Amino acid sequence: MKLKAVIVDDEPMARSFLERYCEKNGNLDVAGSFPNAETALDYLKSNEIDILFLDVEMPGITGFQLLDQMLYLPRIILTSSKTDYAFDAFQYNVADYLKKPFTYTRFHEAICKISNIGNNTKAVSKQEDIFIKSEGKYVRLNYDDILYIESVGDYVKYFTASKHYLTHSTLKAVEEKMNREQFMKVHRSYIVNLGKIKDIEDHSLVIEGKVIPISKVLKSEVLQRINLA
Amino acid sequence: MDTATFAFDERLDTGFLDELFEGDKEHTAIVFEQFLSGIHLYLKEADDNFFPGNMELFRQKVHKLKPVFSFVGLTGLTHEAEVIENQCRQNCGFAEIENSYKDFKNAIAEFIPVIESELLKLK
């Protein structure tokens, strides 16, 4: 069965490319192609779709404001000519980010990625907590509350918004134990919660005001994991 | 439609165009036509905001123009548009942005006949 897609972009040439690419793909049915978020929203309120190709910067309601008003979120592929929406993209669980202008090959990759996400979702563990031993007792931490983990000699520190927990371990052991998509080792001394990243610069990222270095060799993987590459 | 042998004008980014259209002459013609029918309106909208000094709205119009040039192989103009967009973001002086914008529009005027000629060849 074909996936039902909607395109929202105020630029006619960009819409034309997406319509053409969807047709060429063969597995996508363009249910609507809208020049602004307002008309798209009217359609989306009464029609369920599988994929939303969404421009970010549009006159009137922006792409993210449209998402705020939707009752459900389909798979979202952002299409924009700039790439500095990392934090918002992650917050909305954006599946991919196509920087305009993009080729059919890149478009096809995005569609394949969506198919893979669909398959992987079923296998994702439902466990939401981790127990760590700190100051002689076991503490339960919700994965979503962990901002980042720092290696400090023979110890690691788990940072949450309100406090930190020191535990005897190595970053490698933590990495293996957590094994969750939302976490990534970005430097020999840091594992970060990708969903908590506020800003990314050339060689560092920021979480809750803390500047965390990114290893040169891991930079491209970081960008890929947050759908910016 | 196999038109892999279609040779774009050397003044355009032929490598990028070949990759973008993959020899689809019909789609190429549609896009080139869309560019020619829309570019003057885009520039008028940019002018309408630039001259009264509505720099954020002007920046938004330039932002929209960025990929449009690449769609017809004018990747250099996409870069120039990005420079102007960044100047607006950095609140550079009006005169500085005006110089860049003037050069940008001159370059567009120079390339429009090239796109027109390509469209004729495509048809």
Image: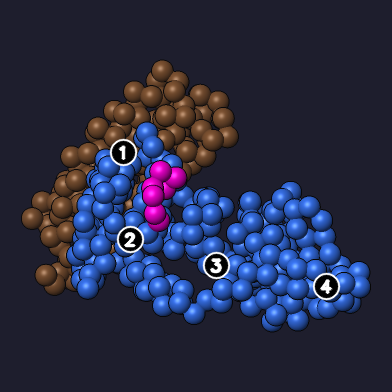
Chain colours: A blue, B brown
Q: Determine crowd level at label 1: few under 14, some 14-19, many 20+ residues with C-alpha closer than 10 A.
A: some
Magenta span contains residue B42: no
Q: Which callout, 4 or 2, points to the residue nearer the camera?
A: 4
Q: Secondary structure at mark 4?
A: strand
Q: Nearer the viewer, residue A175 or B10?
A: A175
Magenta span contains residue A69: yes
Q: Secondary structure at mark 1?
A: helix
Q: Secondary structure at mark 3?
A: helix
Q: Reading the chain from its start, which is encountered first: label 4 or label 2?
A: 2
Q: What residue is disc 3 on?
A: A225
Q: Amino acid at mark 3?
A: Arg
Q: In the image, which residues are magenta?
A: A67-73
Q: Reading the chain from its start, which is encountered first: label 4 or label 1?
A: 1
Q: Reading the chain from its start, which is encountered first: label 2 or label 1?
A: 1
- Percent across and percent down for residue A172 are 75, 80
Q: Reading the chain from its start, which is encountered first: label 3 or label 1?
A: 1
Q: Which callout, 3 or 1, points to the residue nearer the camera?
A: 1
Q: Reading the chain from its start, which is encountered first: label 3 or label 4?
A: 4
Residue at 21 percent across and 63 percent down: it is: A29
Q: CA distance from mark 4 to mark 1?
A: 51 Å
